[in-house]
Image (cartoon, rainbow, N blue to C red):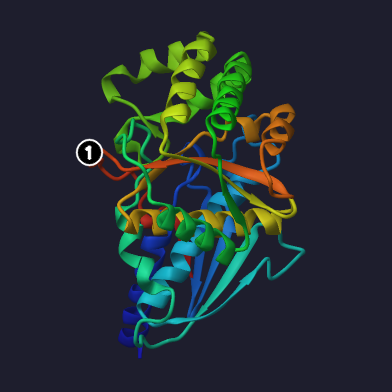
Amino acid sequence: MAEKQTATQAKTLELVRHAVLAPSSHNTQPWMFRVAGEVVELHADRMRALPVNDPLDRELTISCGCALMNLVVAARHFGRFHHAEVFPRLTHPDLMARVHLSQKAGAAQAGSDLFDAIRQRRTYRKRVAARKVPAAVQRSLATAAEAGGAWLEVISGRDARHEVAALVAEADRIQWADPSWRRELAQWMHPRRSGDGLVIAGLTSPLTHAVVRSFDMGNGVGAKDLELADASPVLAVLGTERDRPRDWIAAGEALEAVLLTAQTHGLQASFLNQPVQVAELRAKLHNQLSHIGQPQLLIRLGFPTEQLPATPRRPLAEVVETA
């Protein structure tokens, strides 16, 4: 019996291994998992929060929603998914979700077709190819967002795209002008060996930290991001009808569904969330949209021109507790 339990537990940990490949703000990986038999609990790790950049833990919760989607897709791939509960105990807000599994694996279930994309998805911050994304693919991304409980609106028209790109540049200038924001950013810039954070070269990390903490580079960063936004084949906003923690989880699930669906079509994405992060600009971004609701993320998508290594992840032992 002990050997059987160990084997089952190992299979469950393989699901978690895919869950933690989800994207997160500053690659903070703000999650913990508790495995107890056929139940996997997803908890927020608020010790890895970003109080300046994300004071309400909105993006932290979205990140956990992305991890939840990966966990469910992996469970469906191995034929083990039974059902999931979101915020199952309202008195425990750190318990984001509880996923119930079948003990034995079975045939792949509906929704498992995104499994291979989990390991192939990248946050692609470089320029993408000057190649249009077919309208049918864009519709499939919108459908993926809707299935996850959110909406995806592509910014179309040259003027609208430029106005949104200008909001990104304005938000860059506002954020970089804040010394507290710069210190928080520098805190999460790590060498690859650290397993988390925004990757920088190990030999230059002290200098990079000093520069980021000390100098307002908002104009330069803003100009670069404006150009990136303007040149993106697809610039889209993912949003939700309301703006509660439950909606943030849904936004994360929908986001990961969009990113994985995009990857199946050869696309990669990165984020230009600055206008959502700066409160006074979020309303201006909303004014550019036809949807009623709250913008949660600004995404750029396109075809990559090179393959990037996977972003580092913390060892599984650091993010999993077993009962």
Q: How many marks?
A: 1
* Quarter residue 193 falls in: top left
| Residue 12 can be seen in this image | no
Give the residue drawn at x 42%, y 82%.
Answer: 80
Residue 201 quadrant: top left
View extreme (top): residue: 215
Query: Eyeballing the image, is 151 above or below 160?
Result: below
145 or 157: nearer the viewer: 157
How far across and down, in percent of the image, does residue 152 sit? 57, 51
Please state which amino acid type lies under the numbered disc 1: Glu
Q: Which residue is mark 1?
A: 306
Residue at 77% across, 63% down:
91
For the point 35% across and 54% down, which residue is it? 263
Kind of element beneath mark 1? loop
- Where 21 sits versus 178, above or below? below
Q: Is residue 307 visible?
A: yes
Q: x and y percent of residue 42 in the render?
A: 55, 63
| Percent x, y of residue 85 | 63, 73
Q: Is residue 311 left or right of residue 292?
A: left
314 vs 172, nearest the viewer: 172
Report the residue at 37% width, 13% height from top: 207
State the residue lying farthest toward the left. 306
> Quadrant where the N terminus lies?
bottom left
Image height check: is 163 above or below 283? Answer: above
In the drawing, does residue 314 fall left or right of residue 280? Answer: left
